Amino acid sequence: MNGLELIRAANPHLKPLGDYINLAEWGEKLLNDPLAGVDRRGISERERKLLLKQSRTRFEPTQGSIAIVSSIQDMLWGRVTFGNPLLPANRFRTVQALAQRGKSLVDAPWLPDFADALMVMGCTAVGKSTAIKRYVIQIDQFYVHPRCEEAEWTRQIQVTYLIVPMPVHRGGLLYAILAALDSTIGTTFRSQYADHRRWPIEKLAIEVGIILVQHAVGVLIIEEIQARNFSMAPNREEMLLFILRVLNFGVPVVLVGNPLGFVGLDEFSQDINRLTENEPIHLMPADIADKEWTEGLGPGMWSHNVMPRHTRWSAAIGSELHACSAGFPGYVRKATDGAQLIAMGEDAQAVDLSHLKRYREKSRTFTMNRGLIEGFAEKDPLKLMKYLDVPWEQYGQDWGKLSLADIAEASRDATETTDPSIDEEGKAALRSVHQRIRAAAAAQATRTANKSVRRAGVRPAGDAAGAVTKGALAAGLDALRRGLAAKEPKETQGQDEA
C-alpha cells in the first residue's frame, strides 16, 4: 500500500470528522455572525441590548486563528489516517501499548514512533482558545462504532478530541484527562482510579495513556499553560515526560498558553524536538497597518452594530478603535459595545467616531487596561514592563526597541498581571521567569562583548557584561525611559558637530 492508497483506504475512524476543510474555506467556516439576517430597524431597547451582548459569540477569522485550526485539523486527520484500525500493523501497535499496562512512567519501553505536537502561545485576550473552540464544535466529539470484524472490535467509543486545563501538579493533569473522558462519554474513570495506593502517579500516567489509545483519542489539547504550572513547575521534567509518552502512544498534543509558560523548554533538546514537529504559533494582536486589521478584524467587529442606522467603517474609526483595543479581539469587542451603549444612552440613531473617543476617555474598562493596550498599540515595551505575564523582553527586541543590555538592566518591580486570576504563587513563578530572561540576556551580552573585544585584538578587562551595561541604560524604568528618549537626539547632535 503506497501513501495515497493509505490516505484513500476505508477507515471507520474518519466518520466523526466530517469533510476535510480546505485552507481557502476556513474563513467562511470559522466566521460566526449572530446579526446575520437581522433587521435592526424597529426593534425594542431590550432586543437591541441583548443583540449587543451577543457580540461575545461573534468570531472574526484571522490568519493566526486559521493557522491554529488548520494545523489541529491536519494533526487530527493524520492521527486517524495513519492509525487506521483496519490495518494489521496499527492493531499490533495498539497491542504494544496495552502491553505496558502496570508499568511505571520511567520503566515502560518506548514505541518506535511519535505523534505530532503543536505549541500555541499568546497573551490574554488574543483569542487562542476561542479559535480552537470554533473548530472543534464543527466535529463530533465522540462516535460509537458497532461491531467491526476487520478492526477486531465488538464495540468502540472513539473520542476525536479532549480539552483539559493544565493544573499545577502532574497528578492533577492525569485526573483532568480522566474527568474529561467521563464528561464526554459517560465513564467513571476519575473515581475508578482515585485510589493512590493502587494507582500511584508513575503507574497511573501509563494507564491514562493506554485509555487514550483504547478510545482512539484524536488530539489532546492542554490549555492554560503558565509559568507556575509548566516553565517554572518543580516537576516540569515529569510533566514533559508524560506528554512525550502520550505522543509516543500515537496521540497528538496541543499545548496552549502564555508565552512565558514555554520559557526554558529549549534546555531539553529531545523534548523540544518532539514539541516543535509543527511550527509553534505565537498569536499577536492585529497591527494597525496590517490588512488583518484594516480589512479583517477591525471592520468585522465594527459591523456588530445594533443601532437603527449603520455607520460605515472608515480610516478614522479604524484608527480610534485600534487605539481603544490595540487589536486584541476581546478589547475590540468591548470598545465597540461601549461606544454603542454611549450612543444608546443619548438616544442616537447611529454610533460614530465621537462615541468611540468618549469610550476611550471615560471607560473604566479601558482605564484599567490602558498600559497593556497602549503598550501594544504604540509598540512600547516600557509600558508593558509592569505586567508580569507579558513577555515584554521578546516584544521589545522584535520591535527594535530594546537591546540585550536594556533587558539585563531593566526594572524588577513589576507587580501587575493582565490575568486577574493569577495568584501570588503564580506571580512569584513569573518573577522567576523574568529573572531567567534577564540572566540569559546578560550572559549573551557578555559573549557578544567578548567576541567584539577579541576581534579588536584587545584583552577583555573585567566583566564584559558589566562594561556593556554600564554604558547602556541605568537600572529601573525611569532611567530606561530617559535613555531611550535621549538616544537618537544625542546621535544626531554628534553627527552635526562632526
Image (cartoon, helix red, strand yellow):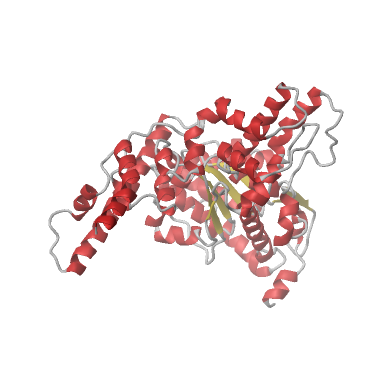
**Side (left or right) of 123 relative to 318:** left
Residue depicted at x 52% and y 38%? 373
**Side (left or right) of 359 relative to 424:** right
Q: Is residue 427 above or below residue 402?
A: above
Q: Is residue 3 above or below residue 461?
A: below
Residue 84, given in percent of the width and then of the height, sits at 69, 64
**Side (left or right) of 386 relative to 349:** left
Q: How many marks?
A: 0
Residue depicted at x 73% and y 25%? 344
Relative to the observer, which residue lies in front, 155 or 279? 279
The residue most toward the front is 497
The residue most toward the bottom is 2
Q: Is residue 39 above or below residue 162?
A: above
Q: Quadrant of residue 304?
A: top right
Residue depicted at x 59% and y 46%? 128
Residue 353 visible (yes or no): yes
Relative to the observer, which residue lies in front, 150 or 79? 79
Relative to the observer, which residue lies in front, 156 or 379? 379
Quarter holding the C terminus is: bottom left
Residue 455, given in percent of the width and then of the height, sits at 21, 69
Residue 327, given in percent of the width and then of the height, sits at 58, 43
Residue depicted at x 46% and y 39%? 169
Residue 44, given in percent of the width and then of the height, sits at 83, 24
Residue 104 visible (yes or no): no
